[in-house]
């Protein structure tokens, strides 16, 4: 089969491409620019730009699915210009992906559109599933709600899965290396109160879940890409300490984090307890359902 990955050189996209190539599939990666090493590629891997495909979509014809992971990271200072760039990049990639699909003679059977669990807002007490309503209560929830509304309005006559992603745990990129670093330095501890929820997923499982969603035509709409056992920030930290044999003792007060990174601190100081009801109801089996087994695997990978 052939798959198109928009944003395929990023943290999740590159792992997804590797997964499908190892299974013997063809993968076309789409981005604003060609990567510098685009000449040294797998025989079934190709790179394209939005501009090149707008004039000639033939290289992505007959794709089984299009996966849109593109968009500027939230992990930057939320200045007015930064917020504008974050919002515009997400809306622009949805528009570009929809335009590309419209140009294809043979449409893919599904679009897997990146989203995030921030759409539920934050809470210390509530538990959220795909049936929970969107709540705009901060910048991340506003971004994700607008992002999903754009996909609802832009994609037509095709199955769309909105992949509401939690914190993806992997060794090479994403949040985990930064979250683990204080523990490796011997100064890990709670962030803020430590009571805020962290809904997470191992990199292997989000890749498998994306593949699962492409293969199952009955899956449609929101799908929470989170493990079935979310944890509090305190439990997350204590589990890092246990697995990496480091102390959990040095708290980071909320006011210091807010002083250091401003409004961006909301990502670490607030959270939500999210369950993957849709994935479980459709029979998806998590390789790493609990945090300890996930972290033990990540540690083993680095040995």
Image (spheres, rainbow, N blue to C red):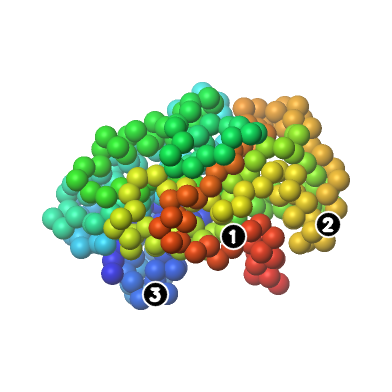
Which residue is label 2 attached to?
A: 246
Marks 1 and 2: which is nearer the front? 1
Q: Which mark is residue 23?
A: 3
Point out residue 101 in the picture as x, y percentages from the top left corner. 22, 49
Which residue is label 1 attached to?
A: 289
What residue lies at 56% left-to-right and 53% top-to-bottom?
A: 228
Point out residue 221 in the picture as x, y percentages from the top left corner. 35, 45
Count of numbered badges drawn on the protein: 3
Point out residue 57 in the picture as x, y percentages from the top left corner. 20, 55
Q: Compared with residue 15, is residue 229 higher up or lower down, i.e. above or below? A: above
**Residue that extends furthest to the front in the rendered view of this protein:** 281
139 on left or right of 94: right
22 on left or right of 59: right
Nearest to the observer: residue 105 or residue 120: 120
- Say which quarter of the image contains residue 254: top right
Marks 1 and 3: which is nearer the front? 1
- Say which quarter of the image contains residue 250: top right
Distance between mark 1 and mark 3 Cα atoms: 24 Å
Q: Are marks 1 and 3 in contact (CB under 8 Å)?
A: no
For label 3, count other residues whose C-alpha is less than 10 Å away and answer few (under 14), some (14-19) or many (20+).
few
Which image quarter is the N terminus in? bottom left
| N-terminal-most mark, 1 or 2 | 2
Nearest to the observer: residue 171 or residue 207: 207
- Say which quarter of the image contains residue 95: top left
Q: Is residue 83 visible?
A: no
For label 2, count other residues whose C-alpha is less than 10 Å away and answer few (under 14), some (14-19) or many (20+).
some
């Amino acid at each position: 089969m052939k798959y198109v990955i928009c944003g395929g050189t990023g943290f999740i996209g590159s792992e997804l491409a590797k997964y499908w190539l190892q299974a013997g599939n063809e993968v076309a990666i789409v981005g604003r620019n060609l990567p510098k090493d685009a000449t040294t590629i797998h025989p079934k891997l190709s790179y394209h730009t939005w501009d090149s495909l707008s004039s000639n979509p033939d290289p992505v014809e007959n794709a089984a699915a299009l996966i849109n992971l593109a968009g500027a990271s939230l992990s930057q200072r939320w200045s007015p210009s930064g917020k504008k760039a974050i919002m515009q990049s997400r809306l622009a990639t949805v528009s570009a992906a929809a335009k590309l699909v419209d140009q294809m003679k043979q449409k893919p059977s599904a679009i897997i559109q990146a989203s995030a669990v921030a759409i539920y807002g934050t809470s210390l007490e509530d538990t959220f599933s795909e049936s929970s309503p969107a709540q705009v209560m901060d910048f991340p929830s506003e971004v994700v709600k607008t992002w999903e509304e754009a996909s609802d309005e832009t994609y037509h006559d095709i199955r769309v899965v909105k992949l509401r992603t939690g914190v993806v745990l992997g060794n090479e990129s994403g949040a985990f290396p930064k979250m683990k670093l204080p523990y490796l330095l011997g100064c890990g501890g709670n962030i803020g109160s430590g009571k805020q929820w962290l809904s997470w997923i191992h990199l292997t499982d989000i890749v498998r879940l994306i593949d699962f969603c492409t293969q199952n035509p009955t899956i449609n709409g929101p799908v929470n890409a989170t493990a079935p056992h979310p944890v509090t920030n305190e439990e997350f930290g204590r589990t890092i300490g246990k697995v990496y044999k480091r102390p959990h003792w040095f708290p980071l007060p909320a006011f210091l984090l807010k002083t250091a990174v401003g409004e961006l601190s909301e990502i670490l100081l607030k959270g939500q307890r999210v369950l993957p009801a849709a994935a479980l109801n459709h029979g998806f089996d998590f390789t790493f359902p609990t945090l300890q087994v996930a972290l033990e695997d990540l540690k083993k990978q680095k040995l």
